[in-house]
Amino acid sequence: MKKISTPKAPAAIGPYEQGYVVNGIVYTSGQASINPADGSIPEGIEAQAEQACRNVGAVLEAGGADYTTVIKTTCFLADMNDFAAFNAVYEKYFVNKPARSCVAVKTLPKNALCEIEAIAEVKE
């Protein structure tokens, strides 16, 4: 097991790692819309979805993968009314259309509107 750690994504705010690589597969922790540079969260679902996608991308890259090698994502929304707006941003990044679950949750850390976790194959 290899830990993934990158300053290009938010540091863990609990007892977990940003991700792991195991047997050629990258497993990311959920990445919310926290700006890794200053800890801020942008306003609105579109801006937050963009930041969450960039954060997942940074962890994938640090693990040797990228958006094109993602097998599965799990997406968490604080409000399912944001589903269409979230999808409009998400589909710009995850162009290979990986398998996905998307669920509404009561709240997310730091009151973020969305969070994304991914499983991807390491690029060869």
Image (spheres, helix red, strand yellow):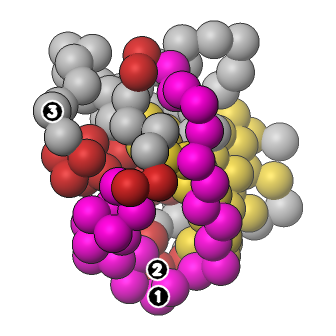
Secondary structure state at the residue bearing disc 2: helix
Residue 19 in the image: above or below residue 85: above
Give the amino acid type for the residue marked by disc 3 in the picture. Answer: Glu
Q: CA distance from mark 3 to mark 2?
A: 28 Å
Q: Are the residues at dot 1 and dot 2 in contact (C-beta closer than 8 Å)? A: yes
* Magenta span of residues: 82-109
Give the amino acid type for the residue marked by disc 1 in the picture. Answer: Asn
Residue 24: which quarter of the image? bottom right
Looking at the rendered structure, the number of numbered marks drawn on it comes to 3
Secondary structure state at the residue bearing disc 3: loop
Give the class, few, some or many, for how many residues have Cα within 10 Å of label 2's Cα (few <14, many ≥20).
some
Give the class, few, some or many, for how many residues have Cα within 10 Å of label 1's Cα (few <14, many ≥20).
few
Residue 43 tag number: 3
Q: Can you name the residue that lies furthest to the front here?
A: 81
Magenta region includes residue 105: yes
Q: Name the spot of residue 124 as percent of width and height, x first.
A: 59, 79
Whichever of labels 1 and 2 marks the residue nearer the N terminus, that label is: 2
Residue 82 relative to residue 68: left or right? left
Q: Report the residue marked by disc 2.
A: 68
Residue 81: which quarter of the image? bottom left
Q: Name the spot of residue 98 as percent of width and height, x first.
A: 58, 80
Give the amino acid type for the residue marked by disc 2 in the picture. Answer: Thr
Residue 78 relative to residue 76: left or right? left
Q: As rendered, which of 1 and 27 lies closer to the eye?
A: 27
Q: Report the residue marked by disc 1.
A: 96
Magenta region includes residue 116: no
